[in-house]
Amino acid sequence: MPFIPHTEDDVLAMLAAIGADSIEALFDEIPAELRVRGLEGVPPGMNEMAVARLMHQRAAQDGMPLCFIGAGAYEHHIPAAVWEIATRGEFYTAYTPYQAEASQGTLQLLYEYQTMIASLTGLDVSNASLYDGASGLAEAVLMAVRANRKSKSRRVLMPATVHPIYRKVVHTIVRNQGIELVELDHSGSGNIEPEYLKRFEGEEFAALVIPQPNFFGVLEEVDALTDWAHVNNALAIGLVNPVALAVLTPPGEWGERGADIAVGDGQPLGAPLSSGGPYFGFMACKQEHVRQMPGRIVGRTVDLDGRTGFTLTLQAREQHIRRAKATSNICSNQGLMVTAATIHMALVGAEGLVRVAHACHANTRALVERLTQIECVEQVFSSPYFHEVVLRINQPVGEVLRALAVQDVLGGYDLSADYPELGNAILICATETKDEADIERYAQHLERILSRRKDGPICTKLRPRAGTF
């Protein structure tokens, strides 16, 4: 908090009231051998003025670059009212609402949040959030293995078009629980071809993960993939962008029966980039799977006088039940981020989210059209996309991005380490925050940087690549 009102006399008075000699005495239960006597590398404390000056200096080092990076963290406009409300004391300092009688405001907000997420995803029920999108996907995999009554398999089909960091997080969390992730390679069109899945028919899988849009920004054939999963007794897990859901078919309507579980990162809904966090994960599912959903669910009821009240309805966590019976012991409410997201969605509204999504797509189309006019810049995939696109250039991406950064342009995400088969590929993104002048500024800097190296590889026209199956 920006201001701590307690003077030394206040602190001494509080200590005297509880019979403690000092603040250190409050921690006398900690064994001496476990106490840290000092923190190496931590400088001495500063006064308020010195701290403010240091923070301004650090902030100035970041500058105000023009950002065209997406890759799971997106620069969206956040109405000023969102964080003005979210940082009010009753929200900012509220803890998990275990005592319903003292937490009606927080519980109502979470209930409204769940309703909004269920509406966005087209599914029956939402929990009160997870830690982030990556761990949320891991929770969905664990949940699918528990919930799939038609298969005892502990194998899950995981497309290579899922965010590479998400795949690593899922692997880390599930590998010691005997769950195998079977990777599906992407085709020349940048998505998972339904025909490719035929080779897995007859094998047992607990679930198929379906990203929409995928990491490349490409739209997957979600109807065909969902139906394939159900025909083969697997659950369908949708990994979705909440802004894209404003204009794309929601997971609950994919195929004939809809996806069984939907997860994603809520960062686009009111959370600033903030050097990578904190963010929050959302999850929704069909009613039949609700008791396998991790985390907590807020419900609405009435009291003896008929007045509406809110309470924690399902709390399948290790704090509430026997550890062995818990569906999760790592999920977190991420209450402040959920508060901001709820306020953000309420202020923007359904129509506003649609306008944001359309603006993102239009700006990305304009960006791709302008950049591909530059010699030796080509679009890698020709499939439909949302607000991210993969481009290929004739020079090492890392060097080009560093040169752009010097000009205060964050030009995209380097794909060469995660997808070397794509060559010098860069993932670019444009949201509603960009305009024609921003796109032109990026294009001019990129064109100048690429023109410096005349000895680079000869450019080739975009042509369909052979499948990498």
Image: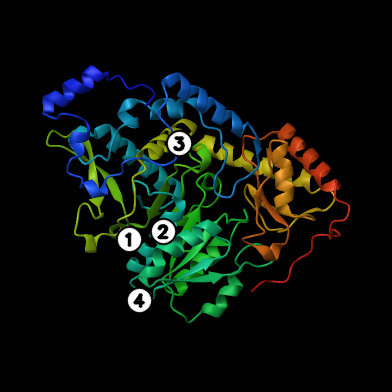
Q: Which mark is residue 152?
A: 4
* Residue positioned 62% across, 66% down in the render: 186
User: Can you say whether 37 is above or below 180 in the image?
Assistant: above
Find residue 235 and report its horizontal and vertical position in percent. 42, 67
**In this figure, which residue is indicated by the disc labeled 3?**
345
Q: Residues within 10 Å of mark 4 (few under 14, many from 20)?
A: few
Disc on the earlier residue, 4 or 3:
4
* Residue situated furthest right in the rendering: 454
Assess whether mark 2 and mark 1 are in contact (beta carbons under 8 angstroms): yes
Disc on the earlier residue, 1 or 2:
2
User: Can you say whether 182 is above or below 324 in the image?
Assistant: below
- The quadrant the C terminus occupies is bottom right
Could one spot residue 257 in this view of the protein?
Answer: no
* Residue positioned 41% across, 58% down in the render: 261
- SS assignment at label 1: helix
Q: Which mark is residue 214?
A: none
Q: How many marks?
A: 4
Foreground of the two, 128 or 260 = 128
Assess whether mark 2 and mark 4 are in contact (beta carbons under 8 angstroms): no
Disc on the earlier residue, 1 or 3:
1
Find residue 371 and report its horizontal and vertical position in percent. 77, 46
Disc on the earlier residue, 4 or 1:
4
Q: CA distance from mark 1 to mark 3?
A: 26 Å
* Residue positioned 18% across, 35% down in the render: 25
Residue 184 image-quadrant placement:
bottom right
Q: Residues within 10 Å of mark 3 (few under 14, many from 20)?
A: some
Q: CA distance from mark 4 to mark 2?
A: 18 Å
Assess whether mark 2 and mark 3 are in contact (beta carbons under 8 angstroms): no
The amino acid type, in three-letter code, at marker 1 is: His
The amino acid type, in three-letter code, at marker 2 is: Ile
- SS assignment at label 2: strand
